Image (tube, rainbow, N blue to C red):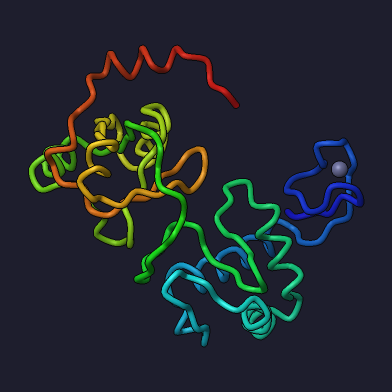
Amino acid sequence: MIKRCPQHGFFRGEHCECGSAGQLLLDETKTEQLGRLVAGGLRHFPGDLGLEMDSRGWVDLAKLGEVVRSRHRWASKELVIALVESDPKQRYEIHNDKVRARYGHSVDVELDHADNRLPKLYYGASEEEADRILEIGLKSASQRYVHLSTTPQKAWHVASFRTGNPKIIQVDAANAQKEGVKMMTVNDDIVISEMIPSRFLEILATKDILKAAQVPRSN
Ligand SMILES: [Zn+2]
C-alpha cells in the first residue's frame, strides 16, 4: 500500500520511518494495479496505451496521468507520482514533467544513466544457461539490456527465483567497458549492460561466493 507522511512524503507499508501511520492513498490491490499499468506504459507497450516515448525512455507525466485515469477511475497523475516516489526499488524517475523507467525495458531505448564504476559484476543462471552464455556471450532475449548484480550474493538471490542451484557468472566489467561495452548504474543493486562477449565472463567457484557472503552487508 502507499501512504503519505505529513513530514516525509510518500511511503510503502504501515508506518513511515518516523513512526507516523500516515494517510492511506492506495491499498495493496490498487497499488498493484497501478504498478502493473505504469510498468506496461514505461517498459513494455507505451504505444498500446497511446503514450509517446522518446529514445531515452521518457514519457509525458501528465499524459501518463490521463492514461491511468482512463483505465481506473480512482487513478491520477498524483498517484503515479506517489507510486514513483515511494518505490523501494527505484524503478522509475521523474524529471521536468517527464517520467521513465530506470531499467527493465523490453521496448527499444537508449538509456543515459551514469557509467558503471565497479570492476566486477555478476549474473546468476542455471547450469545449462551458464554453459551457453560462456559460449555465445551474455545478452537478454526479452529485455533491452542485460541486468547484472553488484555482488555475487545479489546475483544468487535474483537467480534463485528461476533456478534451483544457480551458477554465478563473474563479469570483467572494467575491461569490457574499456573495450566499448556500455554498462550503466541503475541503483546499488543493479547495473544494466549491452551484450557482453564471452571473453569477459567466467564462472565463479561456489566457495568464493560463500566466502563473499560472510562479508557483512552494508545496508
Ligand atoms: Zn514520517
**Count of all numbered marks drawn on residues in the image:** 0
Which residue is at a point 26% across and 31% down the rendered structure image? 170
Which residue is at a point 51% across and 70% down the rendered structure image? 42
Is residue 126 left or right of 111 when viewed as pictured? left
Q: Residue 109 appears at what percent x and percent y?
A: 38, 69
The quarter of the image holding the C terminus is top right
Query: In terms of image quarters, where does ligand 1 lie?
Result: top right
Q: Residue 121 appears at what percent x and percent y?
A: 33, 35
- Looking at the image, the residue that sits furthest to the left is 135
Of residues 54 and 137, the one nearer the viewer is 54
Of residues 177 and 194, the one nearer the viewer is 177
Task: Please identify the quarter of the rendering in which residue 116 is found.
Answer: top left
Is residue 33 left or right of 3 when viewed as pictured? left
Of residues 4 and 122, the one nearer the viewer is 122
Q: Is residue 68 above or below residue 135?
A: below
Q: Is residue 108 above or below residue 158?
A: below
Q: Residue 67 appears at what percent x and percent y?
A: 62, 82
Q: Is residue 97 above or below residue 170?
A: below
Task: Please identify the quarter of the rendering in which residue 145 is found.
Answer: bottom left
Which residue is at a point 46% across and 67% down the rendered structure image? 43
Which residue is at a point 76% across and 70% down the rendered structure image? 78
Q: Residue 203 appears at what percent x and percent y?
A: 19, 28
